[in-house]
Amino acid sequence: MAHGPAQGIRRWLYTTNHKDIGTLYLWFSFAMFLLGGVFALVIRAELFEPGMQIVEPEFFNQMTTMHGLVMVFGAVMPAFVGLANWMVPLMIGAPDMALPRMNNWSFWILPFAFAMLSSTLFMDGGAPNFGWTFYAPLSTTYAPPSVTFFIFAVHIMGASSIMGAINIIATIVNLRAPGMSYMKMPLFVWTWLITAFLLIAVMPVLAAVVTMMLFDIHFGTSFFNAAGGGDPVMFQHIFWFFGHPEVYIMILPAFGVVSAIIPTFARKSLFGYSSMVYATAAIAFLSFVVWAHHMFTVGMPLAGEMAFMYMTMLIAVPTGVKVFNWVATMFKGSMTFETPMLFSVAFVILFTIGGFSGLMLAIAPADFQYHDTYFVVAHFHYVLVPGAIFSITAGVYYWLPKWCGNMYNETLGKVHFWTAFIGLNVTFFPMHFAGLSGMPRRIPDYNMMFADWNMISTVGAFLFGAAQILFLFNVIATIRSKRPASDEVWDRPEGLEWTLPSPAPYHTFTKPPPLS
Amino acid sequence: MSTNNEVVEHETYYVPEQSRLPIFASLGLFLTVFGAGRMLNGSDDGSMYFFVGALLFAFVLWSWFSIVIAENMRGLNSMQLKRSYVIGMGWFIFSEVMFFAAFFGALWYVRSLAGPWLGGEGEGGAANPLIWPGYQHEWPVMNTPDMVANGDKAKILGPEQSMSNPGLSNWASWLPFWNTVILLASSVTIHIAHSALKSNKRSVFNLWLTVTVLLGIAFIILQIEEYVHAYREMGLTLESGIYGATFFLLTGFHGAHVTLGTFMLLLMLLRSILKGHFKHDDSFGFDAAAWYWHFVDVVWLGLFFYVYVFA
Ligand code: HEM
Ligand SMILES: [Cu+2]
C-alpha cells in the first residue's frame, strides 16, 4: 500500500482510500446540489408572478418534493460525509478510515439510489409529489406509482448512511493516534462522532416508516389508515422522530467546520472547547425529544403541545452557548477575512437568525399562525443555506489547498461569497414577510398581495444559483492552477492536517504521528 | 488459521488494496430493489432484475466474507483492526435495535393513544361520533372502525381471532410459549458453545452450535406453522386492520432476523467443522453471529410479552 493511486476510472470505482472516497462524496454532493438547485429554480420561476405560467401544479409539487429530497439526502448529507472522509483521519492521525472497503460501498450506493429516485420523474404518474416529508395518506393512498421506487431509494441510501456512520465511529473510537484523547480531538471530529450516533439511531426509524408505507400501499396493512384502526398522524410522529434529529445531522458537522475555521482567522484558540463538546452532546440528546414541534397543529393533547414546546425552547440554550463561543473566539482576535472566514462569519450571523425564527416557531400558540406558511420555509432555509451549505463551502475553501496543493484565487472567492451572501438574503429574507402575512408553502399560485415578496425572492434565487456556478469555476480553476500552497496554508493554523505536505500524500499517517 | 500464532501487532493498520467488491455490491443491491419495485408495480420484467440482482449481491457478499476470512488467516488483521470489526458489529446491532424500536413504538402508539382517541376518549376523541360512530377501542382490534361505522360496506375487516394469551393454564398447547422456550434454550446452548470454544473444546463447540442451529430451525418451522394457522383458520392476515399489520410486521421482521441469524450460525458451524476455523482467542465471525443471536432473542422477549402475553 505504499504506492499511489491506480490509473483511470478504476481508481475511483475500486478505491479504498479515504481521500479518494472523500473526493467522490464531495463531487457527487455538488452534482446533487446543482440538480436540486435546478428544481428550486423551476419552483422560483413559477412563483415569480401570481397565476400559473410555466409548469402544471402537479409538476410543481414534484419539484418541491424532489428539491427537498435531493438537497437533504443528496447534497448536504453526502457533503459532510465527504468532509469527514477527508478530514477525520487527517485530524486524528489515522492511516485511513477504519473499514475502507465498506467506506467505498457506502459511497457507491448513493449514485444508484439517486439515479433511481431521479428516474421517477420520467415514470407514468410522475415523480413523488407529496413533499419531502411524505405525509400519509398523501404518500400512500394518493401517491403516484413511483412511490415504490422512492421507498426503495430511501432504503438503500439509509443503508449507505448507516454504514458511513458506523465507519466514522469506528475510526474515531479506534484509530486515534496515541495521546489523542477524546477531549483533545478537534471539534469537527467530536461533532461528527455525535452526528454518526444520531444517524445510526434514526436512519433505521426512517427505514421502518417507509416500510410501513410500502406495506400499506402494496400489502393492505392499515398502519396509517384509521378505518383499520391505524392513524395517519402516527406517520408524522415516526417521521419526525427521524426528521428532527436529521436536521441536527445536517448542522452539527457544520458547527465543527466553523469551529475549525474561526480560530484560525481570529488567531486565537477556540473559546470554551469543552463547553462546545457538551453543548453538542446536549443538542443531540434534546433532538430526540422535540420532534412534535413539527406537529403543533395536528391535534395533539394540550400536555403534549406544552411538553414539546418547552423542550424545543430548551435547545436554544446549548445552541446559544455555541454562538456565544464563536463570538468570544473572535473577540479581540487579530482577524482577517479570507474567503473561508467570510463564509464562517456569515454562518454565525445568519444561522442565528434561523435559530431565532426557530424559537418563534417553537411557541406552540404562535406556530398555529406560522405553520405551513413561508415563514417556516424562511426558517429552515436560514439554518440550512447559510448554515449547512455555507459551512460546507467554507470548509472547501479552507481545506482545498491541502487537498489539491494549490491556493484558490482570493478575489474570485470573495466575489463568490458576496454573490452568495446577497443572493441568499434576497431570496429568503422576504419569505419571512410573505409567511407572516399568510402565504402558504408548497403552492404554485398565490394571492396578488404576496406578489412583491415573491418577485424579489425569485431574483435572489437566480443570483444565488449564479454564485454556485462561480464556485464550481473557482474549484476547478484552483485544482488546475499552478499556484502551490504552503504546507501550513494559513497563518499558524491548529491541527494535525497542517503538519502534512500540500497536497496531502495519497497515504498519510501510516504510522501514528507523535503528539505534543 | 494455522498462522494465527504468528499474528503480531502490525505497526501499520491494514488498509486493503483496491477492491471490486463494493461497486458490485452496490449494483447487486440496486438491481434487487429496482426489480422488487418493478415487481410490486406490476411489470413483468421485475422478477428478472430482482433475481439477477439478488444473486449478484449474494455472490459478492460471499466473496467479501471469504476475502476477509482469508486476510485474517494470512495474519493481516492486527488486534486494532479486529477491534474495528467488533465496533462495527456492535453499532450495526444498535441500528437494528432502533429499527425494531420504531415498530414497537408504532404498536404502543396505536394501542395506547390513537386507538382510544378513535374510540372517542379524551381530547383526541372528538371525531369519533362524526367519523366512526359506535367504535369503541379494545386491543386486539377485532372490529375495525370501518366495520363498526360502515357495517356490511366495510372494506377493512378485523381478524376473526387474535394471537393473544389464552390464559396460563393453556400455555402448554400455546405455540408462542414453546417458541419462547426454544429461543431461550438456544441462548443457553450458544453460550455453552462459546465457552467451549474459549477453552479449546472443538467437538463440544460443534455439538452445541449444531443444537443451536437446530433450535433456530425449529423456531422458524413453528413460526411458519403459526402463520399458516393464522391465515387458514383464524382469519388473521396482513389486511386484518391494525392488529394484523402490527402483528405480522413485528413477528415477520423478527422471523426474518431469526432466519438470517440461523443462516449465519449454520455458516459458522460449517466453517468450524469443514475448515477448522475459529480459535479460542480469534473467533470474530462466530462472536458476531452469537451477539446477533442474543439480540434476536431479546427482541423476541419483547414480542412475547408485548404482542402475545399482555395483549
Ligand atoms: C434553535 C433551534 C431551532 C428551533 C427552536 C427550531 C424550531 C422549529 C420548529 C418549531 C419548526 C416547525 C415549524 C412548523 O412546521 O410550523 C421547525 C421547522 C424546521 N426546522 Fe427548525 N428549529 C431550530 C433549528 C433548526 C436547524 C438547526 C435546522 C437544520 C439545520 C432546522 C431545520 C428545520 C426544517 C428543515 C424545518 C421544516 C421541515 C418541514 O416542515 O419541511 N431547524 N423548526
Ligand atoms: Cu424540528
Image (spheres, rainbow, N blue to C red):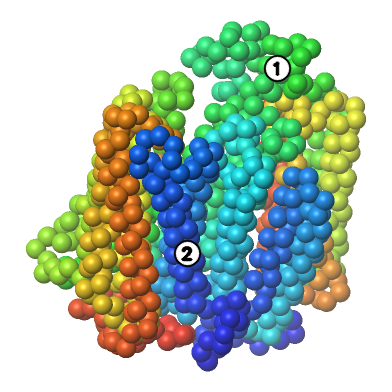
Q: Quadrant of the N terminus of chain B?
A: bottom right
Q: Give the left or right position of residue B24, taking residue A472 as reference.
A: right
Look at mark 2 in the image and give the residue it sits on: A31
Considering only vertical position in the picture, is B121 above or below A186? above
Q: Is residue A351 visible?
A: no
Q: Is mark 1 within 8 Å of ligand 1?
A: no
The amino acid at mark 2 is: Ala
Look at mark 1 in the image and give the residue it sits on: B146
1 or 2: mark nearer the eye: 2
Q: Quadrant of the C terminus of chain B?
A: top right
Looking at this view, name the residue that lies furthest to the left: A332
Residue A445 position within the rendered picture, expressed as x and y whole percent measured from the top left = 41, 34
Q: Report in which chain the residue with disc 1 lies.
A: B
Q: Residue at x 72, y 80 (%)?
A: B70
Near-viewer residue (A374 or B10): A374
Residue A323 position within the rendered picture, expressed as x and y whole percent measured from the top left = 23, 52
The amino acid at mark 1 is: Asp
